[in-house]
Image (spheres, helix red, strand yellow):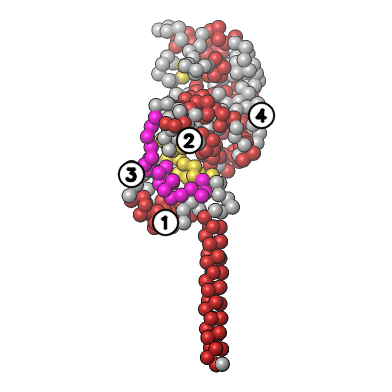
């Protein structure tokens, strides 16, 4: 009898142990699943990689951002990746594998195609967007570098953006596109997801237009949209960095005093077309019917005419205080002659545009 009882207790202990193992396995599996598929999976995370950044520092920052779990393992995988680390601005999504991240930041899967066909699209590529480009020029460059869907897919992504995700688009008129807000920079673009690329540029804009700039915007009694619109004109007009704050001051003074801006770049924007986005103007062009013709319309344009850089936005927020109300280009040097009175401006026009000695 005692023997039977001992055997029963032994079986009961084994069964209990097995049950604990099963319960432990289920708990571990649930934990693993919850860790691998977080509720915020797919959340876009902006991330910048700098030149000559140490692998260990990069791994730690990725871990802090919630993009990887094991910095040491990431470093080991990175060591064996094809291609070197590529500096730039990225947007990753939570839930991406370490292999996917490494592929993006090293160009291991990159194979630049000459067309925008989906089948030939590279996994990712580096793109440099200069200050002063129109949205269409960015779309053309995306297509040239092999982005999936080419020009049309990129432009569709621009117009499909959920604006509620970006605070700085709050006062953007409903009929306005994203011109002005696709921040010029060097990026590591996805070759297959143009929407992600648009989000990357918008996120970069939001980080650049920081709290100090927001406070200054309120201080000078402007909206973000007005600042970006004026900055876009300054961007296209100014060639020499030192002249940006002066040109910004002239435009702001004319606007404040109810004068027309007489801005050539805004007419170029109105007349631009594929193949010639910034046409050379003639005297007749100042009569063109367009809300962007600031020779005929008062105030400022309905929206930005290009995507300005940080320096041009700073110039609008912190213009150089002058008495100038006019300026004219001194030939092709990029330098301008500034004037306080119309007589001075007329003399400068005769000197620099009519080639008088």
Residue 192: assigned label: 2
Quarter of the rendering occupied by the C terminus: top left
Please tell me whether residue 56 is drawn above or below residue 254 in the rendered image. Answer: below
Secondary element type, mark 3: loop
Foreground: disc 1 or disc 2? 2
In this view, the mark in front (3 or 1): 3
| Marks 4 and 2, how far apart at CA | 30 Å
Residue under label 3, please give it: 82
Q: Which residue is mark 1?
A: 71
Sequence-wise first label, 4 or 1: 1
| Coordinates of residue 35 in the picture (x, y in percent) | 53, 57
Q: Residues within 10 Å of mark 2 (few under 14, many from 20)?
A: many
Q: Is residue 326 left or right of residue 170?
A: left
Q: Are marks 1 and 2 in contact (CB under 8 Å)?
A: no
Q: Which mark is residue 173?
A: 4
Q: In the image, which residues are magenta?
A: 93-113
Look at 48% across and 51% down and name the residue there. 67
Q: Image point 43% across, 46% down: which residue? A: 101
């Amino acid at each position: 009898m005692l023997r039977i009882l001992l055997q029963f207790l032994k079986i009961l202990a084994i069964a209990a142990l097995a049950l604990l193992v099963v319960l432990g396995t289920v708990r571990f599996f649930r934990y693993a699943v919850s860790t691998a598929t977080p509720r915020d999976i797919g959340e876009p995370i902006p991330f910048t990689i700098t030149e000559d950044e140490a692998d260990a520092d990069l791994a730690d920052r990725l871990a802090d951002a919630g993009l990887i779990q094991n910095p040491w393992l990431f470093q080991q995988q990175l060591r064996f990746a094809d291609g070197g680390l590529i500096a730039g601005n990225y947007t990753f999504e939570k839930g991406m594998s370490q292999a996917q991240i490494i592929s993006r930041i090293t160009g291991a899967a990159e194979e630049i195609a000459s067309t925008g066909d989906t089948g030939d699209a590279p996994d990712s590529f580096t793109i440099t967007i200069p200050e002063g480009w129109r949205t269409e020029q960015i779309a053309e460059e995306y297509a040239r570098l092999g982005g999936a869907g080419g020009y049309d897919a990129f432009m569709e992504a621009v117009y499909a953006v959920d604006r509620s995700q970006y605070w700085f688009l709050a006062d953007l008129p409903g009929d306005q596109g994203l011109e002005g807000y696709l921040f010029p920079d060097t990026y590591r673009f996805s070759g297959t997801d143009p929407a992600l690329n648009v989000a990357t540029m918008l996120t970069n804009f939001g980080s650049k237009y920081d709290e100090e700039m927001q406070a200054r915007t309120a201080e000078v009694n402007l909206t973000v949209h007005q600042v970006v619109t004026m900055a876009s004109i300054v961007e296209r007009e100014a060639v020499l960095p030192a002249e940006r704050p002066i040109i910004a001051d002239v435009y702001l003074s004319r606007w404040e005093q109810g004068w027309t801006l007489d801005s050539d770049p805004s007419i170029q924007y109105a007349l631009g077309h594929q193949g010639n986005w910034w046409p050379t103007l003639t005297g007749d062009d100042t009569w063109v019917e367009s809300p962007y013709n600031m020779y005929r319309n008062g105030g400022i344009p309905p929206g930005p005419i290009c995507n300005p850089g940080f320096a041009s936005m700073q110039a609008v927020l912190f213009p150089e205080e002058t008495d100038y109300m006019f300026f004219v280009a001194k030939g092709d040097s990029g330098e301008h002659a500034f004037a306080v009175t119309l007589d001075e401006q007329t003399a400068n026009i005769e000197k620099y545009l009519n080639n008088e000695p």
